[in-house]
Image (cartoon, helix red, strand yellow):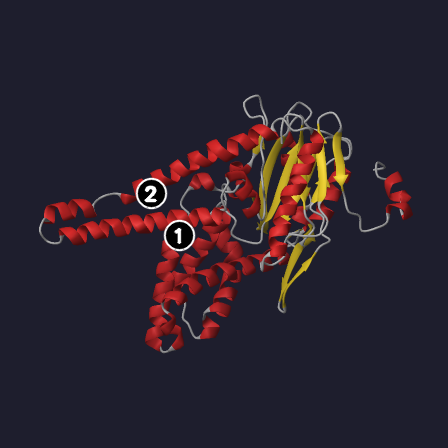
Amino acid sequence: MNKQAVAIAADSAVTISGANGRKIFNKANKVFTLSKYHPVGIMIYNSASLMETPWETVIKMYRRQLSGRSFPTLAEYQRDFIAYLRARNFFTGTGVQIACLQNFALWLINEITKEVANGRRELLDNPNEQNSQEFMQLVEAKVDEVQTRFSDEQNCCPDFLGYTLPQFDAYARHALENIVGIRFTSNSLNASVELRDKLLLLLFSVLRTKGEYTNYTGLIFTGFGDDEIYPRLIPVNVSIVVDDRLRYYIDDNRAAEISDLNNGAVRPFAQTDVIDTILSGIDPALDNIYLNNFSALFGKYNELILSEIGESNPELTAQIQALDTQRIVTEYMQMNQGIKQENYIRPLMNAVSTLAKEDLAEMAESLIYLTYLKRRITFAEESVGGPVDVAVISKGDGFIWIKRKHYFRPELNRHFFDNYFND
């Protein structure tokens, strides 16, 4: 993005997981016009459906009812889209909501029990009443530990503000009991009433708290409102519907707005490792390895000093043991971040701010291609691939396709293009 335009690009790969494994298809559409008449677009990543309804269908139905209407800001397009989902009952029914809630509860409980089992596998490998009881006590302790992470009321999804635990209990208790039966009772494990209540509270807390915990969709709104002369980008995380409440939130950390003080921006979504490497000058995974190694070596350095002192100076030993080494690790991380910002990120953003529209489009496409190329030439799963759709949105020209795949031959379907603007 820069002051002239925003260029968007996406590959066509979609991964389908099933009982027989995973399969990748290279025909998915991820870039759409949000309005046929105004400079606004939308992209999707991760899940391709809202509950069981394809997002492509939802977006095109919204676009049809939007018709020629427009809004002063991009944020109002985003709010109107969410309001449209509500008006259509989120394209789902009670049965689907309950089924998705049960799947979510099963995933959450599996994650907790898996973590406990990894640490105490012998309790499950040698089943008896004492081991089963100890295992369930560890599960309850883990639930208590996880629950402490979800106490920030400021981090609540909008639709869950004012939604109380008793309301959720009345709605979800039966679904949770079914999952407890599947996960525990059927495996001869006894989940106490206290544990069931704690699981219900944890499920409630996780659902209402912002975070990528389930089979979510990233919706990326981008373009210009009527009163905006520079482009904006608003990423929205949408997952499931619970008790007719949509679990969504705006991902403020990855939002972008071009202004007189911010002339350029690059925002990668979904599989970001390659793009992040180009932006920051180092692979994020390698960066984490360096940080962890530094932290570990710093700890060993303290242990070496302590071993040299031995018991000759207990007071000095206690002072060294009390040192806050994490402060040094944090300072090291901040120094590295400053170097990346000065030598890689800022120069690249300065270049992006001066690019012409066609150069923005080429850059967006190239970043996708480089991600595909890395997957292609390594033994990683080729989860990025297929044709790359590229579009440029500018204030004057609107939404312009640079590259776009069709599942049909355009020359045989002239009526599609003739009727495109007939609502």
Q: Percent from the top left, x then y, of residue 356? A: 68, 28
- Say which residue label 2 marks: 329
Image quadrant holding the C terminus, namely: top right
What amino acid is found at the position of numbered circle 1 in the picture? Gln
Horizontal side, residue 178 vs residue 24: left or right: left
Q: Is residue 86 visible?
A: no
Q: As displayed, is residue 68 above or below residue 403?
A: above
Local packing at callout 1 (Cα closer than 10 Å; few below 14, some 14-19, many 20+) is: some
Task: Work out whether mark 1 precedes mark 2 in sequence or the reverse, and give the earlier one.
Answer: 1
- Residue farthest to the top, as pictured: 260
Seen at 28% across and 44% down, the residue is 325
Q: Nearer the viewer, residue 78 or 228?
A: 228
Q: Residues under labels 1 and 2: Cα distance?
A: 28 Å
Q: Is residue 90 visible?
A: yes
Q: Nearer the viewer, residue 122 or 295?
A: 295
Q: Which element is circle 1 on?
A: helix
Local packing at callout 2 (Cα closer than 10 Å; few below 14, some 14-19, many 20+) is: some
- Say which residue label 1 marks: 147
Horizontal side, residue 294 vs residue 81: left or right: left
Q: In the rendered structure, find residue 90 and report the number of the disc placed on it.
A: none
Q: Nearer the viewer, residue 241 or 416?
A: 416
Horizontal side, residue 406 vs residue 156: left or right: right
Q: As displayed, is residue 283 above or below residue 118?
A: above
Q: Percent from the top left, x then y, of residue 385? A: 67, 52
Q: Percent from the top left, x then y, of residue 176? A: 50, 61
